[in-house]
Amino acid sequence: MNLTDLYDFEKEARNSMQREHWTYVSAGAHDDQTLKRNESALQDLSIYPRFLSDVTNRNLSTTVLGQEISFPVATAASGPWYYAHPDAEVAVAKATERSGTISMQPTNAGTFSFAEVAASTNSPLWLQLYHSDDEITEYLVTTAADHGCKAICLTIDIPISGSPDPRLRSTGLLLPKLLQDGNLRERPDLVDKYSKEGLRTLTWDRLEWLKSLTGLPLVLKGIRTVDDSIRAVDHGVDGILVSTHGGRYLDGSPSAIEILPKVYEAVGSQIEVYMDSGIRRGTDVLKALALGAQAVFIGRPVFWGLAVGGENGVFSVLEILRRELDIAMAFCGINRVPEIDGKILSWE
Ligand SMILES: Cc1cc2nc3c(=O)[nH]c(=O)nc-3n(C[C@H](O)[C@H](O)[C@H](O)COP(=O)(O)O)c2cc1C
């Protein structure tokens, strides 16, 4: 089996995953407008290569919130990684450790707790947080902090519970059960406190409370507008992850790559900006970095890697992106990640 790019992994994963699980992972919301636009808008951007520079000594390393990573790609959190492989969260973190990058671990893990993942690898880990109840959040973030978590990444782009599309309502995917089997395994007493109404109770004015629980950097995942970006800075947030949640909620919002340069222009001089949604190629990584992203995250490709080969599959997916980015940088006359800028790109 010779899988040379992420689309090969996607095809292979589609063949090996249960049909219902595949549908849940690959679907967007409603008409898939944002899902498709995430990829097509990236493809609409043209790269203008520059030649006759010495590019023999390329270095893809960079930093994220002061943490050195070997290249600017990390894995985004997703709930049911076990749909693709039983080693789920641990497999992903072992792969990111080998690739020298960050693994964002999910609240709705369903298989392993953050503490168990931390005990299995030396990968830098972030905790992706879904808020449902103050006591649960306090337990999740302080436990993560005790186990070496580098940042709390609060997902803000699901203000009410319930999936917008029947394809996203996978049978058996009950959120309290995912907590019970994963991050709350040591604290079953807290599972009863889970409330789907809780999503609504974490508002701008309470971010200070969230930050005060650990003192860890706080990243907001899912910002789509300049206004919310400025608000985030005003509320002391440390980073913004521009994301459309992979086009899975609110169909019709622009793609992440269209939003990114606006957010970067508004707040990029004050805090780090990252992007996910639609990254499938090293050239996509290059484009996002050229428009201001400090690093990018991948969502569905993690499932594809897991389905094909567990830890090794995710590692291969990351290494393919590294290789493709390296080549793209060479063709643009770029040796180092901070040299990537908007001059190499055009929407025409
Ligand atoms: C099946 C699936 C489950 C997801 N679960 C979560 C989650 O639990 N928390 C979260 O913040 N984002 C979740 N996401 C969104 C990803 O973190 C990420 O933002 C998105 O997948 C990036 O887009 P991409 O799939 O095009 O790379 C999920 C995405 C998928 C496909």
Image (spheres, rainbow, N blue to C red):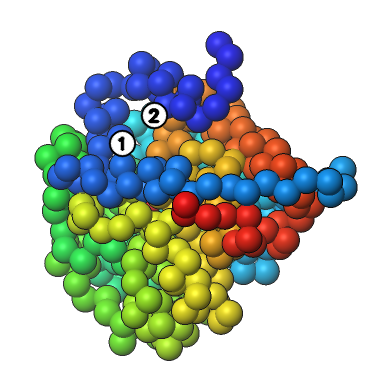
Give the residue type at disc 2: Ala
Of labels 2 and 1, earlier in sequence is: 1
In screen coordinates, is 130 left or right of 65? Answer: left
Q: Which residue is mark 1?
A: 25
Percent x, y of residue 62: 70, 59
Which of the 4 image quadrants contains residue 194? bottom left
Where is 17 relative to 136, above or below? above
Which of the 4 image quadrants contains residue 129? bottom left
Q: Callout 1: few (<14), some (14-19), or many (20+) C-alpha neighbours within 10 Å?
A: many
Measured Cα–Cα span from mark 2 to mark 1? 9 Å
Q: Callout 2: few (<14), some (14-19), or many (20+) C-alpha neighbours within 10 Å?
A: many
- Residue at image position (43%, 56%) is 257
In screen coordinates, is 114 left or right of 182? Answer: right
Viewer can see residue 328 = yes
SS of the residue under disc 2: loop
Give the residue type at disc 1: Val
Where is 103 relative to 203, above or below? above
- Residue at image position (63%, 55%) is 344
Q: Which residue is mark 2?
A: 84
Q: Nearer the viewer, residue 226 or 87?
A: 226
Q: Total marks drawn?
A: 2
**Ligand 1: does it lie within 8 Å of the C-beta at label 1?**
yes
| Residues at circles 2 and 1 in contact by the CB criterion of under 8 Å | yes
